[in-house]
Amino acid sequence: MRYIEKTYPNPSSASMHVNEEMTVKFTLDVNIQTLTNQTIFLLHVETQQIVPIEFRYDKRVLTVRPSMDLLYDDRYQLHLIGGAEGIRFVMMDTPLPTSELISFSTIPHHLLDDPKWMLPANQSIIQDNAIEFKWQVVLEAEYYELELAKTNTFSMLSWPNRREKLYNNFVMPVISFDPGTYYARVRAGRIHPFFSHIEEFGAWSDILSFVIAEPKLSEVVPMGSPIPQTNQIINFHLMSADPEANALFIDPTTQDTITIRLSEAIESQHVGRVFLIGQNN
């Protein structure tokens, strides 16, 4: 006697979507008291972990839905337990004679889109050592990974020194750029809500290139120089800070240094600009 009339998915089904329902149509009415998480469970094949599910039963049809999205391009098994301790039917308290196994795969898909660049402009020439990188927000992304390198293969990174998750869609990396051409790429990622050890990533963005220009001598303010006649902006790389004195020590691309008093202490290894007020202002 056949106890299961049809199932979805079945051997002839295409791959399922990650949040699609599964159905089992029985030939007899099932005793709903025997439908439990012990007699119905969904298994992730690779890790052999049980995936949380919700299920309902109506008119001989059992509907099973994962409590969260499944992984793309992966394999799962829906188990229906039979035998004395398994699913039973109303008629004469008949048990499902043997356990049933429904295997299926999920569709391949890039869960997350690749980020689109906003800043800086591609192939731009940049005088500043403090560069903001910004990209469009990716739907469902929990974090991003940015890579900077001197080659478009990214075989050796200029930044970061170790893997770093960025929780905003912008960043100003702390790095002293040497003059020359650099490349950047970024991708979106997230932690799977059930398999916390599994990360999901979208594709890398288009590769962005930019050129760090040679520093201009006009930006160098040697120690002991007189106050300029007009306002000036200089680039700086903060080498160290003295929190007690609120003093900032700046290396303006020469061996000389100048000291600028601040109202607040700044963390070391900061990149930015100083605005010098001239005598005529």
Image (spheres, rainbow, N blue to C red):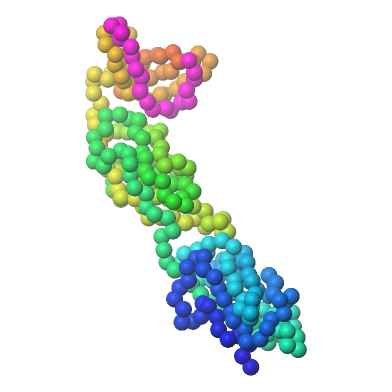
Q: Would you say 248 lies left or right of 39 here? A: left
Magenta-span inclusion, residue 168: no
Residue 199 in sight: yes
Looking at the image, is 209 positioned above or below residue 272?
Answer: below
Q: Quadrant of the C terminus?
A: top left
Residue 158 in sight: no
Q: Nearer the viewer, residue 4 or 73?
A: 4
Magenta region, residue range: 263-281
- Residue 96 position, x and y percent, is 68, 85
Residue sitting at 24 percent across and 31 percent down? 213
Residue occupying the far bottom of the picture: 1
- Residue 200 position, x and y percent, is 47, 56
Q: Would you say 103 lies left or right of 90 here? A: left
Q: Nearer the viewer, residue 135 or 144?
A: 135
- Magenta region, main secondary structure: loop
- Residue 276 position, x and y percent, is 33, 14
Q: Would you say 25 lies left or right of 153 here? A: right
Residue sitting at 23 percent across and 23 percent down? 216
Looking at the image, is 109 positioned above or below residue 181?
Answer: below
Looking at the image, is 220 positioned above or below residue 94?
Answer: above
